[in-house]
Image: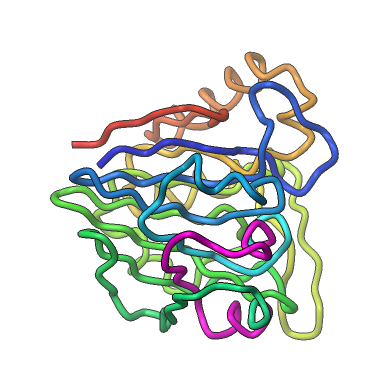
Amino acid sequence: MKLTFLGTRGEIESRTQRHRRHTALAVDYRRRRVMIDCGTDWTNHIDRVRPRAIVITHAHPDHAWGLRAGAPCPVYATPTAWETMANYPIEHHQTLADRSPTAIEGMTCEAFPVEHSTRCPAVGYRIAAGNVTIFYVPDVVYIQSRQDALVGCRLYVGDGATLKRPMVRKRGEHLIGHSPVRTQLTWCEKEGVPEAIFTHCGAQIVDGDEPAIQNELNRWATARNVKARIAHDGLEVVLK
């Protein structure tokens, strides 16, 4: 499995050469490519990625609005995401039920509900190809059924919106927002995930001293027996 971080910027105004486009990931396996998420920055640029399928975590602008001009391939999303995207000119749309492993281009994707937004409910994806399993969740307060989501995962790809300070509010009975990187590293430690990469970077990372931030991240990760790093646009990772 090969991962290419096509974009690593969250829904913020700041952008740099390292974090130019909204967060999106390409997953390649046996010459087949699946693109995960397609925010506004990807409008009219999807053909450059050449995906055979697109999978959407939720329908916020920085994750789905690149599809408002259509898609060159089938698009997979949950029923709640399709409610928001119902008027998008997508010819081939497929529905992913929660906790139902689905074969997509030689890989298996399983959607796990996560707390993040009440208006645009989100999921994270457990993705398996060959002997490798990863979990991808670019926006998250917490993961429902976290143990099932992360068991046996080689890599956790998580939410880099905030480093130490929670960005969490309560709306009714639900929590919305983002858990900090430091908390997500604790999830990896508890579930035995050996490595984490953080994308969907917030202003703390995009506008900050990234080498210094990486050093601090290394200290947190080492204390939890996890390897961790910050993603940037164009980063490629091969997992065997």
In the image, residue 58 lies in the stretch drawn in magenta? no
Left or right: 58 with respect to 117? left
Residue 45 or 178: which is nearer the viewer?
A: 45
**Total numbered labels:** 0
In this rendering, is residue 216 above or below 35? above
Residue 165 or 94: which is nearer the viewer?
A: 94
In this rendering, is residue 62 above or below 21? below
In this rendering, is residue 185 above or below 171? above
Q: How is the image coloured?
A: rainbow
The residue under the point 30% across, 44% down is 28
Question: Magenta segment, which residues?
Answer: 65-84
**Residue 149 location (% of width, % of height):** 37, 65
The image quadrant that residue 164 belongs to is top right
**Residue 202 location (% of width, % of height):** 73, 40
- Farthest residue in the left direction? 131
The image quadrant that residue 181 belongs to is top right
Where is the N terminus found, in terms of image quarters? Answer: top left
**Residue 128 location (% of width, % of height):** 25, 57
Left or right: 209 with respect to 159? right
The residue under the point 28% across, 59% down is 151
Left or right: 3 with respect to 46? left
**Residue 190 location (% of width, % of height):** 39, 53
The residue under the point 25% across, 36% down is 239
The image quadrant that residue 210 belongs to is top right
Left or right: 180 with respect to 99? right
Where is the C terminus found, in terms of image quarters? Answer: top left
